[in-house]
Amino acid sequence: MEEKKIMLSGIQPSGDLHLGNYLGAIKNWADRVDAFDCYYFMADLHTITVRQNPADLRRRSMQQLAAYIACGLDPEKNTLFLQSMVPQHAQLSWVLSCYTQFGELSRMTQFKDKSAKHKDNINAGLFTYPVLMAADILLYQPHYVPVGADQKQHVELTRDIAQRFNSIYGDVFRIPEPYIPKAGARIYGLTTPGDKMSKSIPEGCVFIMDDPATIARKFKRAVTDSDRENCVRFDPENKPGVANLMSIYSSVTGKSYEEIEKEFEGQGYGVFKPAVGEAVIDTLRPIREETERLIKDKAYLEQVYREGAQKASYIANKTLRKVYKKVGFVQI
Ligand code: TRP
């Protein structure tokens, strides 16, 4: 039997999961489970590059694990784990940091953005964050790394680090490919259709755990366009708000843009916006209910993260041992 290709990705539990995480990432991960050997983790080590409230971080990490499962990531078929429970991430990160240049890290756009935003806390972790991400990835020898377009630069750096290491020590790491979702899978903020949906603008962000009334309200207030054309037409350049609503509607109903244009012909945004809201409510309801149920089942979640960490460390350790040997550390 041919071995399955390996896929790996993570999301930081720095905020509650939202519709953009679901439609842009997790939903697609769940669809690929049979074709790939999949590793998905909560990138909790990454979150402390920005100050976190410890109780919130713990709650969000567990909620994210529950939501992964509720969104269809079966822990029997995927390896689901918390990054901080697998010590090899931090260990490999140190080694890789000695094979990464100061200049390379200085060029990362996310570092430039985040250090401008958190001027009072430009810590070393914020700067070396892409090295930890390279370690997250390379430990599992994945073929593909599904990430949003904003993370592509980090995956490219990962490839550069891996190639550099391999050119010195031989084939230690597989060179991973970024796997960027196609245009429609990128979800923008409902009030700021120029920027991706983000927890930092909560009015325009639909959280997986939002109740139906809240979701309905957010969609009613969604920005459409300024030309008052009041016509549901897919034109991302001139009508980014409408295009975003259409891509959300298309993702949750499976309808094409053409079908959507027909469905709302002559009806205007007053009908279209609440309809998108309803469709999203229907999609998220079972996910929210299942997440709520799982959060209460602490014993089950504990079993999932224990087994996940065990499986992940087993694989991660193989790569780490190889690396330690190659660089010249004495083996026990
Ligand atoms: N940096 C990613 C983000 O902020 C999260 C992440 C951490 C990640 N490690 C990763 C994604 C490894 C993919 C692979 O979105």
Image (cartoon, rainbow, N blue to C red):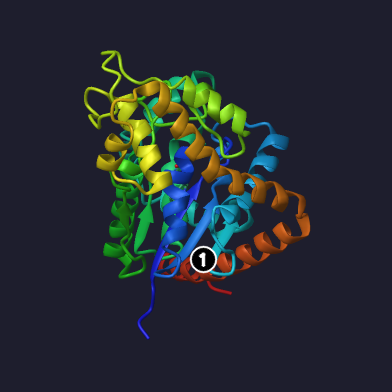
| Residue placed under numbered mark 1 in the picture | 316
Given residues 19 and 64, the one toward you in this image is 19
The residue drawn where x is 71% and y is 64% is 303
Residue 308 lies, in percent from the top left, at: 61, 64
State how many labels appear: 1
Q: Is residue 201 visible?
A: no
**What is the quadrant of the N terminus in the image?**
bottom left
Q: Is residue 285 left or right of residue 316?
A: right
**What is the quadrant of the C terminus in the image?**
bottom right
Q: Quadrant of residue 114?
A: top left
Q: Is residue 300 left or right of residue 210?
A: right
Q: Residues within 10 Å of mark 1 (few under 14, many from 20)?
A: many
Question: Which residue is at the far bottom?
Answer: 1
Residue 277 lies, in percent from the top left, at: 49, 32
The residue drawn where x is 43% and y is 22% is 222
Given residues 199 and 131, the one toward you in this image is 199
Residue 117 lies, in percent from the top left, at: 46, 21
Residue 23 lies, in percent from the top left, at: 43, 45
Given residues 5 and 165, the one toward you in this image is 5
Query: Quick check: 29 above or below 243?
Result: below
Query: Which element is circle 1 on?
Result: helix
The residue drawn where x is 41% and y is 21% is 270
Q: Is residue 123 visible?
A: yes
Q: What amino acid is found at the position of numbered circle 1 in the picture? A: Ala
Query: Quick check: 181 above or below 73?
Result: above
The residue drawn where x is 39% and y is 69% is 35
Ligand 1 lies under 8 Å from the Cβ of mark 1: no
